[in-house]
Image (spheres, rainbow, N blue to C red):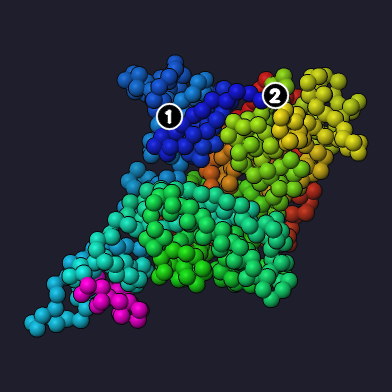
Amino acid sequence: MMETQLRVTFQPQGRSVFVLHGTTILEAAARAGVVIETPCGGGGTCGKCRVKILANAGVPTPADEHTFSGSELREGWRLACQNPIKTELTVFVPETSLFGSEHQILTTSDAAAPRDVRPGVRKTYVELTPPTLEDDAPDLLRLELKIGPFKADLPLVRQVPITLRAHAFKGTAVLADHRLIDFEAGNTSDRCFGVAFDIGTTTMVGELLNLCDGRELGVVSRMNPQVSFGDDVLSRIKHASTCAGCLDEMRLVAIREISGMIDALCAGAKIVREHVYEAVFAGNTTMSHILCGVDPRQLGEMPFVPAHARGLLVPAAELGIPIHHRGLAYVFPVIGGFVGGDTVAGMLATRLDQIPGPVLMVDIGTNGEIVLAHEDRFYAASTAAGPAFEGARIECGMRGTHGAIEKVVFDGDVRVEVIGNAAPSGICGSGLIDLVAELLNHGIVTPEGQLLSGVELPRALAPAFAKRAQTDEDGEAQFVVTDATPGRPAPPVRLTQRDIREVQLGSGAIRAGITVLLRKAGLAVSDLRTVLVAGGFGSFIRRSSAQRIGLLPPEIDHQRIRYVGNVSLAGAKAALLSTEARRQSEELARRVTHVDLSTAEGFHEAFAEAMLFPLVEERHTPGRTGV
């Protein structure tokens, strides 16, 4: 049964999303990619998730009345975590309510005192005095006296004198990493842009930023075309070693996709690529190696040693990145063979070293990266979670795009929420986690992961659910989530026994990794003060569902769990906008102890145990939707 959804628009971000009646503003914001600060975990006690409902604010909750003055309440100010959506809304989200905004990310001490954007690229318009017999200083020295010391390659030594004389000794100097990379005619100082990328195993996300003020100018996401060579890093490593040109083949398909993303970003912002001067890339170790054309085969062989550890700052043209012809590319530092720059970027974006610990950060994707921060020490590991949570290897799975079921609730019957308010075409990771959790709660799936049907089903199961628990033509159990859409060729969306095994493998690997890191630090699950959930769809997962299937520790109070969204991209943005943030990322990477789970004591036993879904003391009460 598909429910009517309500449109919610968030300003000034200009993002809209369709949600079910009763969804909180906080959850709707996360679905729109607007991650709001919630230190109390959505309990309504910290007052940090302040938003302004521009019309139809409704009756304030007790938490609203405690937080806001009478005049603020009349203006529409509310707490995002406490207010359910009952009608279509437009919601204003101030920058102070955002988690990991550009300025917050760049702050090194007091988050309330944001620092200026200070990227590695700067442009300065100059008007020089033409040389005379009395003042015959060389052209580049004359420029240096105006803008400060710099280095220049031979092409610039040839270009600058010509440009100066053709434009009355006026122009704009472009410097990157204290090197003159261009001297442009006229005043182009307000046209200075950069791109930040999260290069995931399955998906890639890019963002265009104004390097003058840090403003976001556009975001674009695409599937990583390298999935055609395998859907996990080990498959990519193996393919790179198959033939002499295989590595370059994989690199070029990614570069072509990145090029198309840059074109789309520039077209959307109505700028030219020559005014994009720097690109920053955060990805796992394998993705970074392939992007740079570095043979990754040693990453697939013990002891899984990467070629480099520190970040790489190279001419973008050497990577084939189509920005300014002398622009630069920065590739994040890596921690180990399977813990890479995306994890470092996440540590940077969340300021993991400044959060009172112990703190656990879990980045859920094709690879599950886990970082534990405790007493100024960091432990990091990567698990082969598999691509199930990104929609792959699931019969009706798909990425989180138009037509994907992203939320499932059992309330008398199966209720679903579909991205784009469209007819369902499949199910993405967040919907999959919801579905398996509900099946467990209703006894349709056993703790061992068996999908039941027919006489095996609980006697008290509601008829609507029993009707959906079927067997296919081969006699295999299946659960029909939605029936075929009338008038459309799309088949019904269903869950199979094999799908559940994929979920067990993914969640079990992550839980086992968490267990090993906690043991390494001498901690128990109950010692954790905060759990940060990151990843391409991290903000879309309901805490209760993730804990029910064992993806996140079920013993933790859900208020300690915070969603931080795509922190890999956020960290890449921070490094693009601040050389200080870049320095911090290098420092953080070197402070981490890398734990290789394949050889870690107790991992295989922990994994076998985590393959079982957690037991619960009480059966789920129909109608409760969790958080």
Quarter of the picture holding the N terminus = top right
Main secondary structure of the magenta stretch:
helix
Pointer 1: what residue?
91
In the rendered image, the residue lying farthest to the front is: 487
Q: Local crowd at mark 2 within 10 Å, few (<14), some, or many (≥20)?
A: few
Indicate the position of residue 352 as horizontal and vertical percent values: 50, 50
Specify the quadrant of the image occupied by residue 379.
Answer: bottom right
Whether residue 112 is situated above or below residue 196 in the rendered picture: above
Residue extending furthest toward the left: 134
Q: Secondary structure at mark 1?
A: strand
For the residue marked with disc 1, what is the amino acid?
Answer: Val
Q: Is residue 430 above or below residue 380?
A: above
The residue at which mark 2 appears reads as 1
The C terminus: image quadrant? top right
- Mark on residue 334? none
Inspect this view and state whether residue 180 appears.
yes
Please state the horizontal and vertical placement of residue 272, each as a whole percent of the image: 39, 58
Upstream in the sequence, badge 1 or badge 2?
2
Write the start and end of the magenta stretch as one range: 148-166
* Residue at (60, 23) in percent of width and height: 4
Q: Residue 423 falls in which quadrant of the image?
A: top right
